Image (cartoon, grey):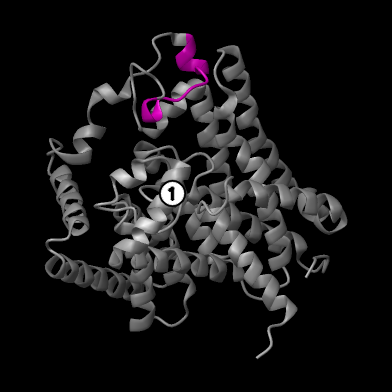
């Protein structure tokens, strides 16, 4: 069976999308940068094919808004004599993510269906396979962990007894949560709601849960948004909720019994109990004891620094006297209240534009992210070049590109 040139291109874009979202450390430098630089050169060389996207008012507005973020952080870091590496967290959205998303949107505009959802589902499945291979085979896990330790630090090795399954840059947070979000994309995208589709839905979702319990929270936020806003009939909503929720409960119950001595299962069970205790007002143990500790919410002493920022973050002990992984606390330390509001406004603009989409899945994702992002920013910094941001911006640009290129037939294919 011969593979056509178009199929080869599609496979190539699937791989690039996977690398852009999950960023596995396959090279000495971040693969996102290579994809981003290559995308910029490709756009310059083939300007006439991409000008329709770049001249669009919404695209130009997005480019300008996201460019303001690294510019502001750069000015604050210089003013405070801080290292300029902090700028990279926001600059890479502009130089890596957006150029690639523009190229992908151009390529996929010729497809009759919204092929981007199939692509992100395939990418999610690839990561899920590596997660389960790591979970059931310790030698595979240690192989992946060894590579990730060299690139991202020994935290991957320290946590490998309970999690760190798979091959991505943020297994304990964003790489796991994105699996939960894509599981929602799949259940909305698949036409036939049967046992096979429900099992594949769980296949993706649980691959996130075993690395980060935050995935469970993200899933239920998606459920809430789906019940309220999804453009589906009441019957279809009930079918999805019944099959998905029922199967999830059964699988979870089976795993707890079958793997009751497994450290990962114990860790997930502890997290579920912590959530239950939290709903009953008990935050004395586990993560909720950390997140409710006022000592983790220390802000700069100077009112000017609180408003404008210090140009540094306090994540991972970067500040000798105080460390916090609370996302919005780090946002405030970096750029102050002004920057934190700016971050929220820029991303909410993107989510609002997605919510207006005529495509049901894009519209759902826009509403979903409006709620999810502020909550995730408590767990860790998400308003940046995170895995979930990469996936959402890619979907947004492709959905927008279909409208821009509609009827123009000006793409490279």
In the picture provided, is 360 more to the left or to the right than 379?
Answer: right
Mark 1: few, some, or many residues within 10 Å (few <14, many ≥20)? many
Q: Quadrant of residue 95?
A: top right
Nearer to us in this view, 340 or 73: 73
Mark count: 1
Residue 227 forms part of the magenta stretch: no
Residue 111 seen in this snapshot: no
Residue at 34% from the left image edge and 73% from the top image edge: 240
What is the magenta range?
304-317
Q: Quadrant of residue 12?
A: bottom right
Above or below for 237 versus 277: below
- Residue 405 horizontal/vertical position (percent): 76, 63
In the picture provided, is 199 more to the left or to the right than 252?
Answer: right
- Residue 412 horizontal/vertical position (percent): 80, 66
Q: Label 1, on which residue? A: 148
Nearer to us in this view, 2 or 385: 2
């Amino acid at each position: 069976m011969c593979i056509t040139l178009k199929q080869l291109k599609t496979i190539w874009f699937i791989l690039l999308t996977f690398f852009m979202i999950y960023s596995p450390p396959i090279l000495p430098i971040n693969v996102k940068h290579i994809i981003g630089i290559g995308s910029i050169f490709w756009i310059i060389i083939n300007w006439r094919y991409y000008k329709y996207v770049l001249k669009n008012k919404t695209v130009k507005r997005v480019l300008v808004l996201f460019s303001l973020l690294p510019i502001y952080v750069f000015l604050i870091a210089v003013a405070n004599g801080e290292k300029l590496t902090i700028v990279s967290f926001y600059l890479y959205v502009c130089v890596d993510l957006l150029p690639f998303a523009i190229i992908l949107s151009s390529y996929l505009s010729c497809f009759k269906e919204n092929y981007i959802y199939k692509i992100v589902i395939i990418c999610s499945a690839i990561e899920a396979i590596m997660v389960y291979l790591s979970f059931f085979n310790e030698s595979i896990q240690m192989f992946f962990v060894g590579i990730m330790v060299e690139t991202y630090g020994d935290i991957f090795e320290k946590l490998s007894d309970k999690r760190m399954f798979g091959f991505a840059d943020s297994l304990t947070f964003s790489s796991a949560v994105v699996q939960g979000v894509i599981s929602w994309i799949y259940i909305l995208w698949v036409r036939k709601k049967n046992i096979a589709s429900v099992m594949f839905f769980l296949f993706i979702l649980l691959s996130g849960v075993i690395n980060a319990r935050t995935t469970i929270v993200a899933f239920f936020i998606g459920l809430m948004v789906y019940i309220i806003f999804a453009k589906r009939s009441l019957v279809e909503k009930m079918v999805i909720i019944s099959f998905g929720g029922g199967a999830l409960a059964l699988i979870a119950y089976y795993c707890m019994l079958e793997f009751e001595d497994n450290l990962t299962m114990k860790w997930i069970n502890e997290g579920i109990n912590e959530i239950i205790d939290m709903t009953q007002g008990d935050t004395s143990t586990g993560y909720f004891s950390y997140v409710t500790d006022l000592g983790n919410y220390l802000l700069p002493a100077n009112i000017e620094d609180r408003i404008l920022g210090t140009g540094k973050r306090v994540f991972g002990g970067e500040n000798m006297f105080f460390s916090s992984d609370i996302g919005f606390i780090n946002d405030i330390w970096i750029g102050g209240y002004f920057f934190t509001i700016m971050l929220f406004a820029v991303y909410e603009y993107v989510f609002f534009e997605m919510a207006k989409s005529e495509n049901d899945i894009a519209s759902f994702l826009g509403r979903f992210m409006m709620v999810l992002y502020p909550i995730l920013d408590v767990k860790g910094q998400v308003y940046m070049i995170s895995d979930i941001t990469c996936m959402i911006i890619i979907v947004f640009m492709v959905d927008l590109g279909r409208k821009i290129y509609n009827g123009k037939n000006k793409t490279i294919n």
